[in-house]
């Protein structure tokens, strides 16, 4: 809002109002008003609230559609906006933006804007104009505490908002969605490509978007007390070593294909409610072994379709962990997690006994052999100092993934993802350089039969990852 247009006689009152708004606005870390602290138990659906009147103006751009970069702001100064144009123009590194109640139709503004909205926002064309935010660090976007704030897009193939190569993004207390009817979209609600450390809090993300959130090569994605509903493909789409943690979210009435689309990615759901979803599958239908993905569910509740789908799909899918405090409609936890009859006789693979390394022999390999298995699951951890053997638990699922381009990732629930580069230094050994600066090496070993009693077979491949203090054995 341009303060130069404000009457000088009102300056004192405006300053007081701004101070009060700042104290109660974006900088506060409490939850917004659009979802309760525990949606899995009780959720106030923003869609059921009385509709707010849209803002009077349609957010047309400046003359000739050319708008420069947002003016610099003082540190921690909140920018208050009330139109789509003001919102997009205010986006910049370190900006804290608060949206007044109303409907922000980005498409109406983008139709008349220039392609270069600012140094950090451009428009691109799909079947209509889309706003793309790029190379922004430390951005906070939040809705005012009182009233409904809704950001919408009209084109079917566009994302409502797309972030590229951004980091430390926080979005809170806003509704996002497409204006057209459910089932016609080809774009997600929120898209994150090559981003780091994104926190979404108390958001309502609705279809017709394909997925509520889509992320590619994005790490540190967190959704807290959010709603994802009525999307036409599924709930969330993660690809290319992305990871996400969803806490206290309600995920309902989505339909189409895989509810969880995971490719070479990790997702953890804590205290989330899955209700009224229905599609081709709940778990990724192509997950194992092609995509090398893992999902973990803790304290989650599942509706009737979700529970039935999970029970059937776990017979042929791996890479999923359900804690005993999960709740299933019509089934007990043991009903869902029991080993299928097709795997009868292999239950001993879950009985942890030390690996007999004397039954292994060093195996030669190259990148093609290494990437033949889409991911390697941790079996045991051996201390280099004491030779003590320990096993992974359901609280610390670790695995390795490798790509033919020399990139890979070491995953744990706690560490999320540690990407690395790998390079062969002989036909029997490979070096790892983690992106965080640490080094490691590994080799492959062929089981000569009996390395694990009654389980391992001749020719089975094991991978030994040599860290500073311990050796991790994967299969």
Image (cartoon, grey):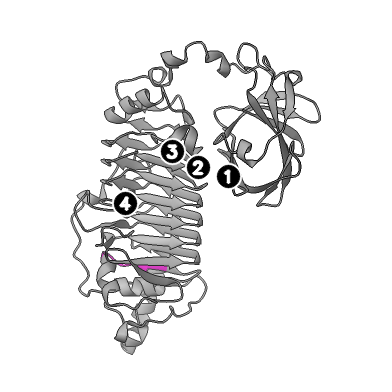
Assess disc 1: are there few (<14), some (14-19) or many (≥20) residues with their C-alpha within 10 Å of its C-alpha: some
User: Which type of secondary structure does the marked residue at label 3 adopt?
Assistant: strand
What residue sits right under mark 1 in the picture? 403
User: Residue shown at 52%/73% (left/top)?
Assistant: 75
The relative height of residue 281 versus residue 134 in the rendered view (above or below) is: above
| Circle on res. 269 | 3
| Circle on res. 370 | none
Magenta region: which residues?
97-103
Assess disc 2: are there few (<14), some (14-19) or many (≥20) residues with their C-alpha within 10 Å of its C-alpha: many
Q: Which corner quadrant of the image does residue 192 belong to?
A: bottom left
Q: Earlier in the sequence, mark 2 or mark 1?
A: 2
Q: Is the magenta stretch mostly helix, strand or loop?
A: strand
Measured in 3D between alpha carbons, the distance from the residue under mark 4 to the one under mark 2, in whole angstroms, is 24 Å
Q: Could you say which is closer to the camera, residue 341 or residue 219?
A: 341
Measured in 3D between alpha carbons, the distance from the residue under mark 2 to the one under mark 3, in whole angstroms, is 17 Å
User: Which type of secondary structure does the marked residue at label 1 adopt?
Assistant: loop
Measured in 3D between alpha carbons, the distance from the residue under mark 1 to the one under mark 3, in whole angstroms, is 26 Å
User: Residue shown at 46%/53% (left/top)?
Assistant: 199
Query: Mark 1–mark 3 contact, CB under 8 Å?
Result: no
Query: Mark 2–mark 1 contact, CB under 8 Å?
Result: yes
What residue sits right under mark 2 in the picture? 264
Of the residues tagged 2 and 3, which is closer to the observer?
2
What residue sits right under mark 4 in the picture? 205
Assess disc 4: are there few (<14), some (14-19) or many (≥20) residues with their C-alpha within 10 Å of its C-alpha: many
């Amino acid at each position: 809002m341009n303060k130069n247009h404000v009457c000088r006689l009102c300056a004192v009152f405006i300053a007081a109002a701004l101070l009060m708004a700042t104290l109660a606005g974006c900088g506060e870390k409490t939850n917004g008003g659009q979802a309760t602290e525990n949606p899995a138990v009780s959720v106030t659906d923003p869609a059921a609230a009385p509709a707010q009147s849209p803002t009077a103006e349609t957010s047309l751009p400046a003359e000739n559609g050319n708008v420069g970069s947002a003016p610099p702001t003082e540190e921690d100064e909140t920018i208050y906006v009330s139109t789509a144009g003001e919102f997009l123009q205010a986006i910049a590194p370190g900006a804290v933006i608060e949206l007044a109640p109303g409907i922000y139709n980005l498409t109406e503004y983008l139709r008349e804007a220039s392609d270069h909205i600012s140094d950090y926002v451009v428009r691109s064309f799909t079947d209509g104009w889309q706003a793309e935010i790029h190379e922004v660090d430390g951005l906070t976007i939040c809705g005012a505490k009182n009233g409904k704030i809704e950001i919408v897009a009209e084109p079917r193939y566009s994302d409502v908002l797309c972030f590229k190569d951004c980091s430390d993004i926080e979005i809170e207390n806003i509704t996002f969605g497409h204006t057209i009817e459910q089932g016609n979209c080809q774009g997600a609600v929120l898209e994150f490509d090559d981003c780091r450390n994104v926190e979404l809090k108390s958001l309502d993300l609705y279809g017709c978007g394909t997925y509520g959130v889509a992320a590619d090569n994005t790490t540190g994605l967190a959704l807290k007390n959010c709603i994802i509903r009525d999307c036409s493909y599924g709930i969330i789409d993660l690809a290319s070593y992305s990871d996400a943690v969803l806490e206290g979210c309600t995920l309902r009435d989505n339909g189409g294909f895989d509810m969880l689309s995971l490719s070479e990615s990790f997702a953890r759901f804590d205290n989330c409610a899955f209700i009224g979803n229905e599609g081709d599958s709940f778990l990724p239908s192509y997950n194992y072994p092609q995509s090398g993905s893992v999902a973990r569910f803790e304290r989650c509740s599942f509706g009737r379709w979700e529970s039935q789908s999970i029970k059937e799909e776990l017979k042929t899918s791996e890479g999923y962990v359900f804690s005993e405090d999960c709740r299933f409609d019509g089934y007990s936890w043991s009903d869902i997690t029991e080993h299928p009859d097709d795997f009868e006789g292999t239950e001993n693979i879950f009985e942890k006994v030390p690996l007999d390394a004397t039954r292994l022999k060093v195996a030669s390999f190259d990148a093609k052999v290494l990437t033949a298995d889409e991911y390697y699951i941790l079996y045991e951890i051996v201390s280099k100092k004491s030779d003590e053997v320990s096993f992974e638990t359901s609280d610390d699922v670790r695995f390795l993934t490798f790509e033919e381009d020399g990139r890979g990732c070491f995953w744990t629930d706690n560490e999320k993802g540690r990407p690395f580069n790998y390079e062969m230094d002989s036909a029997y050994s490979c070096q790892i350089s983690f992106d965080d600066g640490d080094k490691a090496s590994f080799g492959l070993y062929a089981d000569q039969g009996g390395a694990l009693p009654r389980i391992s077979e001749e020719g089975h491949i094991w991978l030994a990852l040599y860290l500073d203090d311990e050796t991790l054995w994967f299969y």
